[in-house]
Image: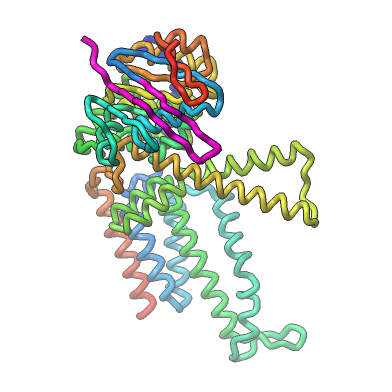
Amino acid sequence: MSELLFRLSGIHFAYDRQRIVLRDADFELQRGERIALVGRNGAGKTTLFHLMVGLQRPQSGTIEAFGKVRTAEKDFVEVRARAGLLFQDSDDQLFCPTVAEDVAFGPLNLGKSAQEARIIVRSTLASLGLEGFEDRITHKLSGGQKRLVALAAVLAMEPDVLLLDEPTNALDAETEARLTDILVHLPQSLVVISHDEEFLARVTQARVRLESGRLTRE
Amino acid sequence: MTRPEQTSSAIVDAAATQPPTTPLLRNIDPRVRLVVCIAFAFVTVSLIHMPSLLGALGLAVAAAVMARLEPASTLKRMAALDGFMIFVLGLLPFTIPGAPAFSVAGFEASHEGLWRAAEILLKSNAVVLMILALPGTMEQVELGHAMAGLRVPEKFVHLFLFTVRYIEVLGREYRRLRTSMRARGFTMRCNLHTWRSVGYLFGMLMIRSIERSERIVAAMRCRGFQGRLPSLADTQTVRGTDRAFAVVSLAACIALFTLEHA
């Protein structure tokens, strides 16, 4: 039996009168699904992610996540823990001085003790092949390393869903292959924004297009 | 989670390895180094007699040697400080009244002024050298954690750590914009076009910084941030060598103080 993780219905969102991003948009995500979210530049794909985790609020429509309707900021705190959002620019995500602190940030916020957090850090880094990165300084990492550490920081919260915003953006072929390999083997449900067709074909099974404010399954 | 089979060496390079022998001073607990440095600075600025001032400089040199500071770059940094002070120091002998020592173009330089200049020169160099030797050898992040460990207000520590983290990101943004300006033939001149363009450049930097800070907070909220930064750092215990270093340093400071008032 499939379990509904997200249901967005009748979502309307505009930054201002001229920039209407979503009009009466519907979106559903079942557990185990791996969806590619495609659409033109500026179509509002990132905004959709932000709406899903409550960083933005829709002007109308309902957001149901993990079986509950979410409206207030405090409803979304739980959603953010269970739906891990990977940002386009890893520099936005890695704000702690060291890798260990950054990966531990989420677990500590979820109420884990420093000791538990340290165990999570070690196992998460190891699972991504980043052993020994604990004490590295985040801003001295290469672009590829930053992306993988940012993914580790999201995975450390053990989310049910991953929302990946252009994860292969600005990666070299080798790092992209490595990231693809990691994502293919992850158990989580995924929604992936990308313009890289080859990558999407490997990582996702379904496709949703965002066009003129509406979402359609292809 | 399954582990990816291949581990690419290009991405996962070996963690920055420490040099085989770490100088003694760099192994001392950063908090202890910071406290010792502050104590030394306070004692040194209170000194006015030549023997104790020379003693302070001697201690600072000893610390620099123990920290294995690079002589060339250290001297360069100290020269930068001295260059900054040279005018004040050069004028002191002529502005402080006292027994005349020599005269330049009819202006009398006093003995007292010369001593005062020497005193300030010794003090400042001793303190700067100690700063270079003790906190100067820490990673900036280590310094931040040391401050947190010493109960420096949390806000200040966070401000410091965020600055360390993002100053390079901002610098990169600045250089990118500057390069693109240059690529379109922009050169700095003394005209309205230059001033306006530079104004746009800094305005754009400001906007981008604000937008970035908003994205950073959003990313933090995604990971459960609710206004407080948790700490992973466990309270590192002060070890025997740290304690020994603290005791020796304190004794040295007291010795300076006694020498001064003997």
Q: How many marks?
A: 0
Is residue B57 rendered magenta in the image? no
Residue at (68% x, 85% y) in the render: B102
Locate residue B178 relative to residue A134 in the image: left or right. right
Residue at (66% x, 49% y) in the render: B200
Q: Which residues are magenta?
A: A1-27
Location of residue A179 by image quarter: top left
Location of residue A18 by image quarter: top right
Give the x, y percent position of residue B227. 30, 48
Q: Is residue A186 visible?
A: yes
Location of residue A170 by image quarter: top right
Q: Is residue B19 visible?
A: no
Considering only vertical position in the picture, is B235 above or below B110?
A: above
Considering only vertical position in the picture, is A148 above or below B87?
A: above
Residue at (55% x, 50% y) in the render: B71
Main SS, magenta region, reads strand
Considering only vertical position in the picture, is B55 above or below A133?
A: below
Considering only vertical position in the picture, is B97 above or below B235?
A: below
Give the x, y percent position of residue B202. 62, 51
Is residue A20 rendered magenta in the image? yes
Say which quadrant the C terminus of chain A sits in.
top left
